[in-house]
Image (cartoon, coloured by chain):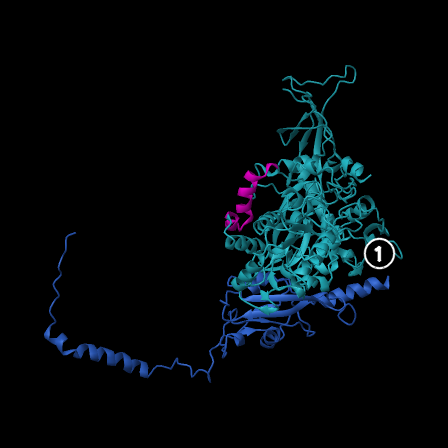
Chain colours: A cyan, B blue
Amino acid sequence: MSAGKVTDGRIDVFIDGEKVRCPPGTNLIDLVEGMGKEIPHYCYHPKLSVSGNCRMCLVELGTPAMDRETGKPVLDEDGAPKIMYFPNPVIACATRLTSGMRVRTQSAKVRECREAVLEFLLINHPLDCPICDQAGECLLQEFATDYGRGYSRFIEKKVVKPKRTVLGPRVMLDDERCILCSRCVRFCQEVVEDDVLGFVDRGTYTTLTCYPGKQLENNYSLNTVDICPVGALTSRDFRFRMRVWFLKETPSICTESSVGVNTLVGSREGKVYRITPRRNDGVNDTWMSDSGRALYKRIEDENRLIDFRVNRLPVRPEDALSEALRRLQGDKVAFVGSGQSSVEEHFLFNCLSRAAGSVLNCLVSRTREGDGFLISNDANPNVRGALCLGFIDTLPEANLTGLAEKINRGEVDAVVVHNEDLTTAGIGRSLLEKVEVIYLGSHGNGASETASVVIPGLTVFEKSGTFINQQFRLQKFLQAVPGPPGVLDDLVTISRLLNLLGKDEGRLATPAAVWAVLSRRLKCFEGISFDTLPETGALLDGSAFRSLPFCEGPSLHFEPETGTVEARA
Amino acid sequence: MAVKILKRRPLSLLEKTYLPQILIGLKITLRNLFRPSVTLQYPEERPDIPEGYRGVPTLVKDANGREKCVACQLCEFVCPPRAIRITSRELETGGEDAHIEKAPDEFEIDMLRCIYCGYCQEVCPEEAIWLQDVFSISGYSREAMVFDKEKLYQLGGTLPDNHFKWDRKKAEEEAAKRH
């Protein structure tokens, strides 16, 4: 038997008799989760420090016995190493695996421990699951059914604690439901370093509370709601609005900044109710910002465009397209793309700009100061997509001075705008009135008000596609809800225009069709298809753009290229 | 496939007169003439509704006149024809009922969809929805057959319950405040 023998730096351990190879020091809970099994736990979180207070993850642990004199393993009669089990169960979350360890996760003793722990946790926990927002995704509910006793022996009165405590502008606390796992406390200390939460009082009266005079108001406060294993911390925005079992969760990408936070969009019957982070250890771990969670409210924004318009009058979609086509056929057309468009839209938009013989392609920048964590300095989620596709070869500008000059000189008489407001990008209304604007976008703005043709588009929640984030990671988002009735997908609109211009790309109206062509046409996208793109994304080779002075500073899992700094200097 | 032709037996003379059959029929009629009548003069007369009858689903209030439903939406989830629609709200924090947190904002049951299966009553953790003895409902439009919260409470009324959930909760809270 090769138990305990070190091979390629990895060790063999035995989980319920099954041999597993892992690096030394692997966390037992993580390892078992990787095997597709489960050690129930409350306080342990893979991205936080180990506190070991919930005692739910108790397992039986054994190590090979060592002879103290010789330092060699003791062998039993069969020649196999003798295993010494610890007399009492140990917590799996604080167990770092060493060579030859044996773990029992399903023994009678372990089951008994779990039953007992759950019984203690449920002593004072209110049974108001019908009211509780966590019901349906509550670890206490799940483990009580999986590992619990099934009935309560507790006949005394439950401890009454404060309910509906407002911890901050977005978070509400129900102290009765809290099981004191301290995940939220550790999150605030370790991840956002805004140490405002803590426990006060003793015994069964221990309550979670904010530091006097302070609030849980940092821009990552809603992560505490996500990691709360029970319904103690709830989001004031989502609270009581929808039961979680109705929500369809669609993988998506946050458009707040070029970090490209992975998200899940929870929707029911075409309405988005909440956005939660999706784990991606290369991008956002398990976190996301509060401001990014509120972006779904833009779907029902009052300046949402739903009508096709020509000269401010509503028309049929085909009429709007043919009017747009007529203006595209001139030879003084400029194109303003958007850093918020998907890679597929950039591709088709670029094809359209070439087909129309564009005199100028540009992108509007959206820089602001990020927080160095999950909000970068660039509020455009997909500038790199436009670069990779060759729509632009320099970085976007805040003021489109080049375009303004060309309009002034009469070199441009039509501008195709995708989702951007030109009036805030250095092109005033008086200047815009000199040209015909074809506006394609989801929301109205200064550019759409002066536009001669307005074609409504979809938000990121209503379409599928890909973004390339600051790490040059290609990430996929899927359609969560249908768009407003009658509104065409931007890809469909652009491909129809290409079709009317007699271009081959006119048949590429879905992300999958676009990728079938893109992967063959561009070297950096070789071998990628939309359907098989992994959920965690694919890193592309961005070395061709190393010399560009990107505006992003360091953030979680991202260091700006050194070349960028040199180029800036 | 072989075809077998069956010959019909010719009717006898007595059968051709139809007299025996008519007499048998008259005998049955005559017998029922002297039996007690089972016909109800509906709608003036109404049948006795047995215990456990599954009529129209209704919402009930507790003895204090509070709504029992907490908008957990389990009935909406379990309803096979998806006849139930609930939107919930958070109750105000102050006042007499401060310890009650959640209630339905709107509660609609589409009676044209309802199949009277009683799953909603079975699943309700608060015993707030009951299929009672109302069995005949009608309306002039489809919209009129979607019963809203007000109509459902009107049909449901108040049912006795032995839990006094909110009263107990309030008493516990007040007892805790004294410490």
The amino acid at mark 1 is Gln
Q: Main secondary structure of the magenta part?
A: helix
Check the image and name the residue furthest to the front.
A409
Relative vertical location of residue A512 with respect to residue B178 in this rendering, above or below = above
Query: Is residue B15 positioned above or below A429 on the image?
Result: below
- Residue appearing at x 56%, y 48% in the figure: A511
Image position, residue A395 (x, y; %): 72, 46
Q: Is residue A231 visible?
A: no
Residue at 72% over, 52% down: A402
The quarter of the picture where the C terminus of chain B appears is: bottom right
The crowding category of the residue bearing disc 1, from other C-alpha atoms within 10 Å (few below 14, some 14 to 19, many at least 20), is some
- According to the picture, the residue beneath numbered tag 1 turns out to be A215
Q: Secondary structure at mark 1?
A: loop
Residue range in magenta is: A504-523
Q: Position of residue A352 (x, y in %)?
A: 58, 51
Question: What chain does badge 1 belong to?
Answer: A
Indicate yes or no whether the magenta region holds residue A96: no
Quarter occupied by residue A82: top right
